DNA sequence: ACAAATATAATAGTAAAACTATCAATTAAG
DNA sequence: CTTAATTGATAGTTTTACTATTATATTTGT
């Protein structure tokens, strides 16, 4: 995807940020440093004070970009799903066979990100780690309905909708496409986390990527048999 | 299950609590009040100070039972999985046909809890809401490996192992039983949450319990076709 | 090139959260 | 009925999550 690298940017909804971190040097440092620090110490221990000292700025300056650390996390997760939709489009483009399209789409959302290259401010490998470990915190709370109204989850919904449509291409009468897609996406995240920390909750077979294989097979069986 | 109600207690590992909340009136108030309050205001806004004032006690007294609010949540979630294992045993008891056993087991972990009756201190309906909305917070953090060493997740692992074994009864050569079980359990929780707050991420069909149906069908297809 | 606008840094301060410590008053146990 | 354990009342500490103010850079328009 490097050929687009410098020309494409992923847009995140206004309302998530106070001032766009795309627009300045400090904004870029907040994103890069934020990703590094959240990945390193986890979201609970992460504070704007620590981030400020890491990037050589101040708490107050960071607060001009994001209302709270929650908003920064929302920004990062939204960016991730915006990026995933872009990958989804590229990787299913011109693929005619619906089953092939579906398998490719599932690969995009279940595979482990290996290289960080495409976008300047964002280390995609670390960002995926963050999404896996922290993203449920953006909606598993009492502010979810308010945040939803403000469009904080549209990118995620769009990805789910896009894959759901491919599922319906394969099986027009399948009743639970969204349920199946979110089961797969959230499931794949969980399995990657469990494989590292709670291996008894998963089945790690070495060599192949068993997570991708498992979910591809699961979906195909569910909708074609 | 009422017939056992007063005689059975669910045991939670030492190390989760400083003093067992089973052992005293205050302990009971902490559990009951804790469940009510976490369910009401969510885990992020929940504090021992608020709980103390709700149950007419003090912060310091609650800290004698639990090191932190994190430990109280761990206690509740562990209790829940201990209780689920107990339900699993009862509901699959004397059922000979493996597929029937499997379907019953899946029903236990995917159905919505409707009545609160069995255990004195615990409102199981509210507790399930808490497990759905908050339980990922007990392992999705940087302390997970330390907590795992201390046995904070054994009850959950036991439930997963028990259902995995039933899956292997149905299909001896199935390679991913744990992966499938955790996909179903976490998936069912997510779907119930999405149905309430982010309906575009699921498919709510009224009338029947589509979540139970969906996951039962998914598992049977996956391991028998 | 220079004024005006804007962005950032430095500093200070507040309210609440997440504990810890102390000691007196209850309550329970032998 | 004495002693030990439990709870309540109070107070204090550190950290987090902000907000406010002013000074100093840096950009931008002309």
Image (cartoon, coloured by chain):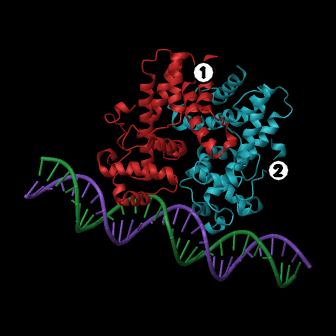
Chain colours: A cyan, B red, C green, D purple
Measure the alpha-carbon separation of dots 2 and 1: 47 Å
Work out whether residue A131 or residue C15 is closer to the camera in this orientation and state it: C15
Mark nearest the camera among 2 and 1 is 1
Q: Quadrant of residue D8?
A: bottom left
| Residue topped by disc 2 | A6
Question: Is B117 above or below relative to A101?
Answer: below
- Residue, x 58% and y 19% (percent of image)? B174
What percent of the width, then of the height, locates residue A108?
73, 35
Left or right of B142 on screen, residue A100: right
What percent of the width, then of the height, locates residue B5?
35, 35
- Residue, x 69% and y 39% (percent of image)? A113
Secondary structure at badge 1 equals helix
Left or right of B15 on screen, residue A135: right
- Residue, x 52% and y 47% (percent of image)? B142
Res. A116 in view: no
Secondary structure at badge 2 equals loop
Q: Looking at this rendering, what residue extends furthest in the front direction?
A: B207
Question: Is B159 above or below relative to B170?
Answer: below
Same-chain status of marks 2 and 1: no
Left or right of A5 on screen, residue A133: left
What percent of the width, then of the height, locates residue A177?
71, 32
Q: Quadrant of the C terminus of chain A?
A: top right
CA neighbours of label 1 inside 10 A, class few (<14), some (14 to 19), many (20+):
some
Question: Is B154 above or below relative to A223?
Answer: below
- Mark on residue A151? none
Work out whether residue B187 or residue B151 is closer to the camera in this orientation and state it: B187
């Amino acid at each position: 995807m490097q050929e687009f690298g410098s020309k494409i940017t992923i847009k995140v909804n206004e309302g998530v940020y106070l001032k766009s971190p795309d627009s300045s040097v400090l904004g870029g440092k907040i994103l890069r440093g934020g990703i590094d620090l959240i990945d390193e110490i986890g979201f609970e221990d992460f504070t704007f004070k620590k981030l400020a000292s890491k990037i050589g700025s101040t708490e107050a300056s960071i607060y001009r970009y994001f209302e709270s650390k929650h908003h920064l996390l929302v920004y990062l997760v939204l960016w991730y799903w915006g990026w995933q939709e872009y990958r989804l489009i590229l990787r299913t483009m011109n693929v005619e066979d619906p089953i092939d399209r579906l398998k490719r789409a599932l690969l995009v959302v279940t595979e482990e990100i290996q290289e960080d290259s495409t976008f300047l401010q964002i280390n995609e490998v670390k960002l995926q780690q963050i999404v896996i470990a922290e993203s449920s915190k953006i909606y598993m709370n009492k502010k979810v309905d308010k945040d939803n109204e403000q469009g904080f989850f549209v990118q995620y919904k769009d990805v789910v909708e896009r894959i759901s449509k491919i599922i319906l291409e394969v099986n027009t009468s399948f009743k639970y496409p969204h349920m199946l897609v979110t089961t797969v996406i959230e499931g794949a995240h969980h399995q990657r986390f469990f494989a590292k920390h709670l291996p008894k909750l998963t089945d790690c077979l070495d060599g192949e990527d068993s997570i991708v294989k498992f979910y591809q097979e699961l979906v195909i069986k569910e909708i074609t048999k």
